[in-house]
Amino acid sequence: MPWSERRRRTNHTVVVAILLLVLLASAPSAEEKQLSIYGPRVSYSLPVSEYNGQDYVALLEVLEPFGNVSAGGDGNGWKLHFNNVEAEFQQGGNLSKIAGQKFGLPSPFVLENNRGLVPLHALPAILALMLATKAEYHEAARRLFLGGAATRFTTDLREGGLSVKFSAPVDPLISTEPGKLKMTFTRDPVVSNAYILRLENPLISSVAFSENNGRAELAVQGKVPLLAQFAAGGKTIDIVPAPSQAQSAPPAAAPETTPVAVAVPPPPTLQSLTAKPPFVVMLDAGHGGDDRGALLSETLEEKGVTLAFARRLRSELQSHGISAVMSRDADVTVPVEQRAAMADAARVAVFVSLHAASQGRGVRVYTAMINSATNMPGSFVPWDTAQAGHVLTRRALADIVKAEFGKHEIPSTELSAPLKPLNNVAAAAIAIEVAPSGADVGSVNAGVYQQRIAAAIAEAIVVSRSRVEAER
Amino acid sequence: MTRALIISTGLLLAAVVAMGVYLHFLRRNERERAQNVPDSRPISAPVAGPASRVTFYLAYDDPGVVRAQEASIALPADPAQRGREILHALLGEYVKRPSSHELPAGADVKDVFMMSGNTAVVDTTPAFAEGHRSGVFVETLTVASLVKTLTANLPGVTQVKILVDGKERETLAGHADLECFYDVATVEQLLQQLQ
């Protein structure tokens, strides 16, 4: 082959390779595999990794929300301590020892950057041994239910729409697309057999339940724009026609192909802005992503502790029938201003910023360092002093939280602090800084300790709810 | 042009590019290394003047309080320079070991500026913020100690702004707001809680 011809071919190959790389880089990445775990008190999701075509999950991260867990490697060996239970694994080995019993893994154990990964197939059996509880695994959907955790529901088709009643309060992500309203349950252990129910109804044509990638989905197909309304403290969701449709019922012969753009919640109107919004608590897990927060010990970062604690507190609040949303529910960077903006846009009733420290003992409760005198009358609230109008409710809330800590025998201090973004939140805002319970800094991440603190805060919010509602 | 010449030229060009990239990384590493060396040089010349009584508001991590403590130091007449010397002496208490509230080596005040009579702007060294321990409580103690010490010794100052190396910074070490102006009245309320 002549030299010029070979060079031309080489050039073509290089150009094609570059184009392929550009196409690969710009192509949308596939959805990350998730595992959702539902316990009686906590629910959370974890990423699933793939090795040799098998799904794996990090065992330490799975156990963290349930108690005090630590792990360490020694050559090819990896030991994990969870409360009083010990487990031993070998890199690349199928044999392990859990709670004194020999345990065979269906695929080899993987040790990656000192993180022990176990095959997902084996996880239910491993957890059953380590937690001594019943584990039910929906393998196709990667949803694991522990200790009988399950929220069941019934649907009731009525003249005004569809009523979905749950056995416990739920907090789904509601989204819409033309002609469809979807409720996605990631944190709630909603269970049912998969089904599609076709209906002869002027408003709703079908209801379908499905599970996939760590979440459950209830999809309602509508003939008119639909709206979801929460009732009974989050235990009932009524699917009703959106306001414009409710005022004038659709003609019977309305063409089904009419595009329906549904917004849930509907776009804010002057009426909706002046009406009192529902009682919702925003939990702000401090730091995250690029911002690790304080390094509490050699291996413990503040951002991880605050996220685990926020999840516990959310479950605790939901168990009291209080809706809670989170400013972040993963290890992602969220600027502090954006956290306050989210709270203000959602018109939350209470904002709780969560932090952790290695210094001191017990819990510190903070309110904003701001003068009530800086509050300005009028409809618009200045960003820098948005908290000024909530001086009484935030102090009352902080007092009640401190009192509840006293009842739970958790040492606590109440202070004001120049902590961002408390000043920018137009709601009763407090911050909680969890310090170790004793000499061991790792106790800030202990499940039992965090659970006690979360229970006290949740009870304080329940007690102060009427006070907060009265001043909104 | 022969094939051998083309290959040789290509190899030489590749070597030039590789050397250039290597040189770029060497220079960048050297620049970063130079920036990370803590600046422990004295910030201001020793002050010769009559000794004056000042009150430091010293932070104590354990048991988490701020306490007033009298001291006698030589101070210049100019309020801005007085402020700088007072804070220099205060931070000196925190930099030495052992300390009731440890700050990193090199933590100091570069300058204090008086703005429109009642506002003081404190410019601190990079080490003051970069090496500060992270936590709501420890950062709050530092801010409260610094603001109260300055305002207690410079009558008429009601607002304090803290800069780091001449620039505004979002937080001290991840928590305490450094974008705001600290109001003496609100810091006073905090100090009552820290007694």
Image: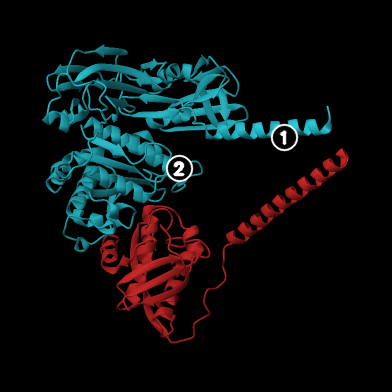
Residue type highlighted by circle 1: Asn
Q: Which residue is mark 1?
A: A11
- Disc 2/disc 1 C-alpha distance (Å): 41 Å
Question: In the rendered image of this protein, does residue A425 appear above or below residue A91?
Answer: below
Instruction: State the count of labels.
Output: 2
Q: Dot 2, how many residues are within 10 Å of its Cα: few (below 14), some (14-19), or many (20+)?
A: few
Question: In the rendered image of this protein, does residue A419 appear above or below residue B68?
Answer: above
Identify the residue at horizontal 24%, vertical 38% (top origin).
A458
Colouring method of the image? by chain
Identify the residue at horizontal 32%, vertical 70% (top origin).
B159
Left or right: A183 in relation to A234 = right
Could you say which is closer to the camera, residue B148 or residue A96? B148
Chain letter, disc 2 residue:
A
Q: Which residue is mark 2?
A: A289
Q: Which chain is cyan?
A: A
| SS class, disc 2 | loop
Could you say which is closer to the camera, residue A444 or residue B186? B186
Quarter of image, res B149: bottom left
Q: Position of residue B164 (x, y in %)?
A: 46, 64
Mark 1 or mark 2, which is nearer the start of the sequence? 1
Q: Position of residue B114 (x, y in %)?
A: 38, 77
Q: Is residue B96 visible?
A: no
